[in-house]
Amino acid sequence: MNPISERMRYELLAAKYLLAIETDDFATQEALWHLAETEPDLVTLFQQVHDDLLEEEQQAEVEKVTQAIEESVEQHLPGAAVVKEPSQAVSFADVAAELLRSMPNEFSSDELQYNDSLRSRVVPLPDDLGLSNLITHAEAAFGPAPREYWQAFQKLAIRLRMRHADAENLQLAARREPKKENRS
């Protein structure tokens, strides 16, 4: 069998194995493991499927716990802010969460509902935060909202982006170099 056919065969077996796991099809899982007894590469592939599934479950659990903590902080400490390490670009979700935290009583119920839907959108903001560009970009992706909402959103987006840039620059700040031993 040529290498391409062999790779396709392994990919199909991995997909079949994943489907068997997701549907609790133990007979298919057993048959595939029986086939893998004679093919070490297939064993490695099935183990990788398990590792990937475990990693996804762990990530989902971390996100679930993080969200529960953030919601508790928002509910019980309304004046507090959940500060996240700047590990990526500022997203619509970041701005929407900050908007809810800083101005919860200044929006209509429709605007609050729209804002809640944005809180789950971890999509980076456009580079150009001009109001017309922001509205065009956001409404093409998420649907329309009143201009007043986007004006408040824009102000906070700029503020968050500046805060993010400041935090990145702080990471680049000069640090004292450890003393070198003098070995003369």
Image (cartoon, helix red, strand yellow):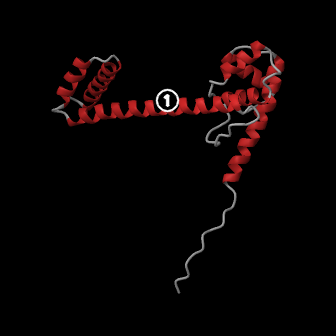
Q: Is residue 77 left or right of residue 70?
A: right
| Residue 54 percent location from the top left of the image | 39, 32
Query: Is residue 9 visible in the rendered structure shown here?
Result: yes
Q: What is the quadrant of residue 73 in the picture?
A: top right
Return the residue nearer the eye: 139 or 79: 79
Residue at the image point whose x is 81% and y is 22% from the top: 105
Tell me how many marks there are. Answer: 1
Residue at the image point whose x is 33% and y is 34% from the top: 48
Describe the element under mark 1 as helix, strand or loop: helix
Residue at the image point whose x is 81% and y is 31% from the top: 155
**Quadrant position of the N terminus in the picture:** top left
Query: Is residue 126 visible in the rendered structure shown here?
Result: no
Q: What is the quadrant of residue 79 in the picture?
A: top right
Q: Residue farthest to the bottom?
A: 184
Return the residue nearer the eye: 10 or 47: 47
Q: Amino acid at mark 1?
A: Ala
Residue at the image point whose x is 80% and y is 27% from the top: 103
| Residue 115 percent location from the top left of the image | 71, 20
Query: Is residue 107 positioned above or below 94 on the image?
Result: above
| Residue 178 percent location from the top left of the image | 60, 70
Label 1: few (<14), some (14–19) or many (≥20) C-alpha neighbours in 10 Å: few
> Which residue was labeled with disc 1?
60
Q: Is residue 46 left or right of residue 52?
A: left
